[in-house]
Image (cartoon, grey):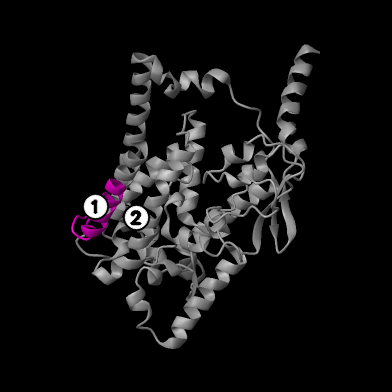
Amino acid sequence: MRSKKRIIITVLVCIGIGLLAYFAWLFPFYVFETNDFDTSIEKLLSFDYLKTLVPLFIMIGLSAAGIIMIVLLRRMLAKSDKKFSRFADVRTSRARGKAPKQKPAAFMVIRWIVMIVSAILLIWGGLIFGMGISSLSIPVLSCPWNTEEMTNSSCYYLSHLNELFELPIGNILLFFISTLGFIFVLGRVICGFLCPVGLIQDIMDKLRKKTNTEGIKMNEKMYGAITPVKWFILLIFIGLCFAGGNFCNFCPAVAVSPILAGMSTSLYVSGFLMVLVLMGSFFKRRAFCMVCPLGTIMGFFHKISLFRVKKDCQSCTECGACYEACPMGIKMIYTERDKADVTHSNCIMCGECVRCCPEDNALSMTFAGKKIYTSSRKKIMSGYEEVRNYYDDKKG
């Protein structure tokens, strides 16, 4: 009965997504009377730029209101029914206190720097440097509507295959060569390091932690229920163009990148979905990455990527810290007992599993066979040592 119920729910969710796709171009979220594609420096320094940011402010406001309503509802349920007390902040992280803070690993610092620089370049790069290399395609959701980006985004032609094959053969070959080249060298490091939407989701996760708000704890059944939705969205992503639709009309990236660049872009279902992405990523880190169609496509090539996640099964103590830390819910890193290569198609190479692993060299990230980040017991314990030294000094 439970399996039938899950199938019915999944089918209904997929039908709902399909209806959104079908009506995406009919229901505008925000409409400009005239679309302005001027993204000059003069435009960014003028009052007109603030007008282009209006839909972004609306999305932020709606997301904040939704998050506050969910938090208040949790607290009301906790007070009225003890069964829901696990949702109350006072009975979770605040009551137990936080684990001592680790010193930030160099890998994580570099990752955040790369994400921020990448977002700036993919949104304002062409404007800053006065140049563009749009003939090269990088497979990341750097929105193609933003004409001032440094590179062309693969997502547009992958979701508009009918337009891709109308190009000259040389352009088609360059598209596939550059796209596959980025995937071969980087794999889904693109998701963890370069994607502007990924940066936005990580910022929302940081905001949740700063406000001591409890997130959503996912389990295997919940991750399993998301999988069919992911494949259905991929089907829409690739096939919608042949039905006369436009995937860009409900892609969340359209609701952020062009607007920040100063383009007066009318928004359709993409605006509503961006609100859901902001809310979802606040309570569940990288919520959109679990269903992102472009990430799914890059995952097909994870076996040939030069970046890998490796495991020393002899050093692993099966504590499960890697599984708990993984924002994508990849369990094989925890359960694998034989193979050294535990790179999964869903892995965004964020390094959280390595950071949280308490055993020396049990997990590591490699590039072309060379270790670039390894787990360390000393790093894990550094935070506890600082706390112990603090109390020793107070006693002394």
Q: CA distance from mark 1 to mark 2?
A: 10 Å
- The location of residue 212, given as percent across then percent down, is 49, 28
Position in image of residue 335 (x %, y %):
63, 43
Residue 160, position as x, y percentages in the image: 34, 71
Q: Say whether disc 1 or disc 2 marks the residue closer to the N-terminus.
A: 1
Residue 263 to residue 157: above or below:
above
Q: Which residue is mark 1?
A: 29
For image coordinates 40% across by 18% down, the residue present is 83
Q: Residue at x 76, y 37 (%)?
A: 377
Query: Quadrant location of residue 293?
Result: bottom left
Which secondary structure, mark 2?
Answer: helix
- Identify the residue under disc 2: 255
| One can see residue 204 in this view | yes
Which residue of the protein is positioned furthest toward the front in this rendering?
1
Q: Are marks 1 and 2 in contact (CB under 8 Å)?
A: yes
What is the span of residues highlighted in magenta in the rendered image? 11-31
- Residues packed near mark 1 inside 10 Å, few (<14), some (14 to 19) or many (20 plus): some
The image position of residue 109, as x and y in percent, is 64, 48
- Position of 121 with respect to 11 (left or right) is right
Q: Do we see residue 54 in this rendering?
A: no
Q: Amino acid at mark 2?
A: Ala
The amino acid at mark 1 is Phe
What residue sits 32% from the left and 39% below the top?
5
Q: At numbered mark 1, what does the secondary structure look like: helix, strand or loop?
A: loop
Question: Relative to residue 387, is residue 259 depicted above or below?
Answer: below
